[in-house]
Image (cartoon, rainbow, N blue to C red):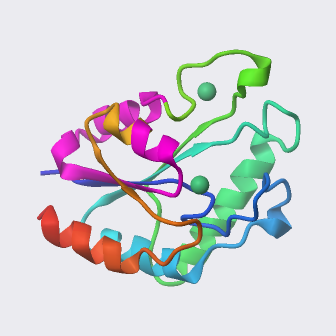
């Protein structure tokens, strides 16, 4: 039985600063996120990031710069033998046209569930915005709303225990 944890990025994995993270230097992985991701890795869960990155559509940063941030994140995780399995991001922004993937829509979650062969009842979503929870709900996945930059390690323990 495959299990998956979906994580929003800004405010859950890296420090939410109240604006787009446009430079790799401003991408700061939260220490508790490293710990939380490792817990899911060790429990055999797939770890998936689901993130809106409308700054790409706005030309604030490029997909290559975003990849660089995510490589940096994986390097920091690797130091404690943790990793993220999949990253889905929406590069669009409604100012520049409609898309189907941007949260609160659920397409990214649905794609990940299908790709990983995970049932929605064996998955959960941790996010710091209502649109994260809506995106999860649209794919029948339970969402857990936290405050931006809140330590979600206790929540990880709770979810792992609940879905085992
Ligand atoms: Mg967020
Ligand atoms: Zn999109």
- Residue 72 percent coordinates (x, y): 68, 67
Residue shown at 50%/81% (left/top)? Answer: 32
- What kind of secondary structure does the magenta stretch mostly adopt? helix
* Magenta residue check for 108: yes
**Displayed quadrant of residue 158:** bottom left
Assign ligand 2 to one image quadrant: top right
Is 68 placed above or below 15 here? above
Residue shown at 18%/50% (left/top)? Answer: 122
The outermost residue toward the top is 97
- Residue 138 percent coordinates (x, y): 34, 31
- Residue 11 percent coordinates (x, y): 60, 63
Magenta range: 105-134
Q: Is residue 42 left or right of residue 104?
A: left
* Magenta residue check for 61: no
16 or 6, which is in the foreground? Answer: 16
Q: Is residue 74 left or right of residue 94?
A: left
Which of the image's four quarters has the C terminus?
bottom left
């Amino acid at each position: 039985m495959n299990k998956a944890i979906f994580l929003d990025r800004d405010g859950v994995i890296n420090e939410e600063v109240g604006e787009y993270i446009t430079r790799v230097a401003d991408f700061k992985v939260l220490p508790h996120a490293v710990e939380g991701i490792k817990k899911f890795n060790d429990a055999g869960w797939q770890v998936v990031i689901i993130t809106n990155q409308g700054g790409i559509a706005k030309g604030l940063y490029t997909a290559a710069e975003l990849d660089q941030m995510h490589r940096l994140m994986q390097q920091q995780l690797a130091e404690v033998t943790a990793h993220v399995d999949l990253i889905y991001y929406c590069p669009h922004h409604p100012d520049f046209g409609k898309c189907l993937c941007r949260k609160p829509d659920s397409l990214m979650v649905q794609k990940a569930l299908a790709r990983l062969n995970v049932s929605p009842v064996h998955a959960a979503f941790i996010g710091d915005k209502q649109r994260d929870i809506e995106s999860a709900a649209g794919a029948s996945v339970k969402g857990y709303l936290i405050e931006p930059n809140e330590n979600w390690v206790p929540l990880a323990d709770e979810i792992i225990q609940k879905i085992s």
